Image (cartoon, helix red, strand yellow):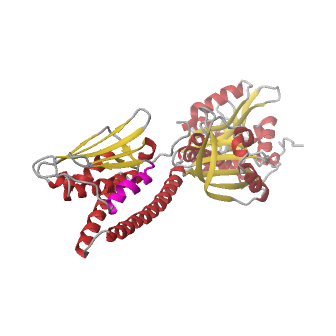
Amino acid sequence: MIHDISDGADPFRFLGHHGEVAGLIRDYDWSATPLGCVETWSPSLKTSTAILLHSPVPIVMLWGEDGVMIYNDAYSAFAGRRHPALFGSRVLEGWPEIADFNSNVMKVGLAGGTLAYRDQELTLSRKGVPERVWMDLDYSPVLDESGKPVGVIAIVVETTERVLAEQRNREESQRLQNLFEQAPTFMAMLSGADHRFELVNPEYSKLIGNRSVVGLPIAKALPEVANQGYVALLDRVFQSGEPVKKMSERLLLKRAEDGSMEERFVDFVYQPIRDERGIVTHIFVQGSDVTERVRAENHQKLLVNELNHRVKNTLASIQSIVSQTLRGVQTKEEASAAITDRILALSRAHNVLTNENWDGADLRTMVENSLDAFQHAGRKAIQIMGPKLRVGPHAALSVALAMHELATNAAKYGALSSPTGIVDVRWSIEPDGVFTLRWAEEGGPTVAAKDRRGFGSRLILEVLPRELQGTANIEYPPTGAVFTLSTSLEAISDRPKVDGA
């Protein structure tokens, strides 16, 4: 119990404390303040001063109408360079930068009210320069012996470090959220053993057809994915704690428009996330939709295989051309010329198909290219007519070689050997899908069928119809040779025939 001593004993015995601020109280000239000499202090003032001195929490007492400040050692650290000059001063003068704030505190406190602030932001000059600080502030009135408010007790807990740390965390979280949202790859965060969606970024939403999945377990949100083994893979990661990385994985996803399944290919990683106890609680999903890349790679492989196939076929064709040509010639010179001409014809057909990526060719372009070298200067000896038609690569090569053989024969013996001869090349497509190609000569010398068939004749009458699954015929009326090829539109287009079509 604290006693008021007036018999010459230590007037500061009530402090019961020997810290720095207690020493200031003992040495301070209180007679120069509205509080007067310590010997005249009221019991309530002495008791309140003793209580705040013993508190480890920063506390300042604002006494009287002037708000004279008495505080403890903890508050002196908070005051910074303002201490010790701040001690014993009037609060509105001691903290002029927040005079309005403290004026309201004094008004409320001396009226018997209380105030509480959490993470209150103020700008204080504790180190000679203004700085933003945050504090938890609790204000209560101090009552005298009659129960009248005569001062205000302020408990001051600075929260600046925590508030700034939380701000940094929020900013970092927002930055990560922005990265998450703007990432060019798909991302998702799954929680718990049932892999419930917590977060998905726009790229992930795009991948799954913008379905609403947040809050749902993956087996319910994307049931088609569960049936493809991906949930079992997530289970393994969740249980083992080991990440899983996959490349070019095939994934079938349901389309929102019609419910059909769409094939995609993805690179992805399942990364387990552990809590402070080391237990897996989440799985972070990150990856890229590489469908176009995989399809391009597959297409490239297909092209390489197709190229190998075509090279082999071309070499086989050349071998056949050489072998068959040599059977029907008498001299080396004749053989060389015939072989060269036929290979050049094949080469020109290849050029046309290469320009079209071997996806087929326009029949007129192919025919014109094959016959261009046989046109007579100054007149149009070869007339070409027919509807626009795109033929397949296989059919294009066959037709090109046939055109070359017919033109070569016409140049040697038929219409193209005469300055007045004309060749009419035309084709048609009947309503029932029958394709007919006709080569007709006129204006040249009279020709007749040969008893012995050479390579050219065998090519157009045997090889060509067999390759195009049709029939071929050549006649020799007085006007000139007439060749006719008849087959189906499917065969000339390299399309398989559909039953019943």
Identify which residue, 93 or 224, lies in the foreground: 224
Relative to the observer, which residue lies in front, 451 or 395? Answer: 451
Identified at 69% across, 45% down, the residue is 225
265 in the magenta segment? no
User: Is residue 466 found inside the magenta-colored segment of the image?
Assistant: yes
Res. 63 image quadrant:
top right
Q: Is residue 308 above or below residue 74?
A: below
Residue at (22% x, 54% y) in the render: 410
Give the side of residue 200 with respect to residue 434, left or right.
Answer: right
Seen as rendered, the residue at the extreme bottom is 332
Give the dominant element type of the magenta stretch: helix, strand or loop: helix
| Horizontal arrangement in the rendering, residue 404 relative to residue 139 (left or right) | left
**Rendered position, 129 above or below 108:** below
Residue projecting furthest to the top: 111
**Where does the image place residue 478, in percent across and percent down from the top left?**
21, 46
Using the rendered image of the protein, determine whether residue 121 is visible from the camera's viewpoint.
Answer: yes
Confirm whether residue 73 shows in the render: no
Please provide percent x and percent y for residue 210.
60, 36
322 w.r.t. 102: above or below: below
Q: Nearer the viewer, residue 302 or 401?
A: 401
Q: Residue at x 87, y 43 (%)?
A: 2
Residue 421 locus on image (x, y percent) = 15, 48
Task: Classify the position of the N terminus by image quarter.
Answer: top right
Residues drawn in magenta = 454-469
